[in-house]
Image: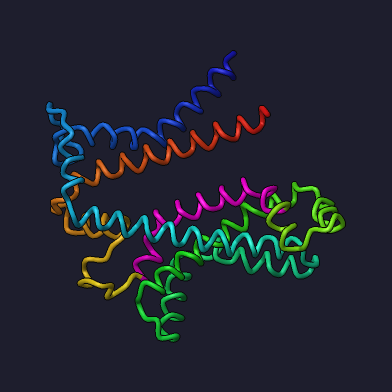
């Protein structure tokens, strides 16, 4: 009995430690206080209205979403192709490719960021949108591979050969047999790639465009925008609206996870 109480108390403390700051942020997004830590008796949706009316912040959100979707799609395609190629390669080749793929995961992100910036400069990309996208793909690609490979290992290896014996071409067998079997892994890798891209700061800082259609100072992602806002001593006028933006991002991610889990449970029930 005592062990059970201690176990649940420990789990509760861990959950409070992880989620209490986020819950506090959500609460403050409806509070009229201009600074977190100073409580106001007024409750309002003003911060959400300010977020909607802040054109610079909305442009930053659009920049971040577009970059995350592009990086997620490219990383998912390349990661799926790479995982399938690794899975059907020889053991020695598989080990070599697996080690190379894991380098960006193990390596310090600052090293990866500086390396990509240097390579893009040598290739005359400089700090352009291409260098930014390449950096995010390098960051996300290994995690897609790590999500797809377990699904390939769980798959019956005889299905592909059976489809070929029944007259299917290799391409048709790939899209009608292999891809449907590993689709949950592909989807998980895509979601992880988008999450990593949305959250990244270091690679974005070293590779983001110095010019991109508009003035250099106007191109930002959420991570760089938030850092720059707080780097000014918290005097940026958009800081209170960032609480509303953070709440929206948190709620959207929770909804995505809940929907994905519900769909997975329905598949298991069938």
Q: Position of residue 211 (x, y in %)?
A: 27, 75
Q: Main secondary structure of the magenta part?
A: helix
**In this view, 226 is above or below 128:** above
In the foreground, 152 or 13: 152
Q: Is residue 24 above or below residue 205?
A: above
Residue 203 versus residue 190 in the image, above or below: below
Dividing the image into 4 quarters, which one contains the N terminus? Answer: top right
| Horizontal relation, residue 194 to residue 63: left or right | right
Counting labels gives: 0
Q: Residue furthest right?
A: 165
Where is residue 52 drawn, in percent x and y?
A: 20, 45
From the viewer's perspective, is residue 15 above or below residue 53?
A: above
- Residue at screen point 52% across, 22% down: 8
**Does the stretch in magenta take in 72?**
no
Q: Quadrant of the C terminus?
A: top right
Frontmost residue, 270 versus 144: 270
Answer left or right for 32 relative to 73.
left
246 or 182: nearer the viewer = 182
What colouring method underlies this structural image? rainbow
Query: Magenta part of the protein: which range?
Result: 178-207
**Quarter holding residue 120:** bottom left
The residue shown at (22%, 54%) is: 57
**Residue at x 58% of width, y 56% of height:** 144
Residue 108 in picture, x, y percent from top left: 49, 65
């Amino acid at each position: 009995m005592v062990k059970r109480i201690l176990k649940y108390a420990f789990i509760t403390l861990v959950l409070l430690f992880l989620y209490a700051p986020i819950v506090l942020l959500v609460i403050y997004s409806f509070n009229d206080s201009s600074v977190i830590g100073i409580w106001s008796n007024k409750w309002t949706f003003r911060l959400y209205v300010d977020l909607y009316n802040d054109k610079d912040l909305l442009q930053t959100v659009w920049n971040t979403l577009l970059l995350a979707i592009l990086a997620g799609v490219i990383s998912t395609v390349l990661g799926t192709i790479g995982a399938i190629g690794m899975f059907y390669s020889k053991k020695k080749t598989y080990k070599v490719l697996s080690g190379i793929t894991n380098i960006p995961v193990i390596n310090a992100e600052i090293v990866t960021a500086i390396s990509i910036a240097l390579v893009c400069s040598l290739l005359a990309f400089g700090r352009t949108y291409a260098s930014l996208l390449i950096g995010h793909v390098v960051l996300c690609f290994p995690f897609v591979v790590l999500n797809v490979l377990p699904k390939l290992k769980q798959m019956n290896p005889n299905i592909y050969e059976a489809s070929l014996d029944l007259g299917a071409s290799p391409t048709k067998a790939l899209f009608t047999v292999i891809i449907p079997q590993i689709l949950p892994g592909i989807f998980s890798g895509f979601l992880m790639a988008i999450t990593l891209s949305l959250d990244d700061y270091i690679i974005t800082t070293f590779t983001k465009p110095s010019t991109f259609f508009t003035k250099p100072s106007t191109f930002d992602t959420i991570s760089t925008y938030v850092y720059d806002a707080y780097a000014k001593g918290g005097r940026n006028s958009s800081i209170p609206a960032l609480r509303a933006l953070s709440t929206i991002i948190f709620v959207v991610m929770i909804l995505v996870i809940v929907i994905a889990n519900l769909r997975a449970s329905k598949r298991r029930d069938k």
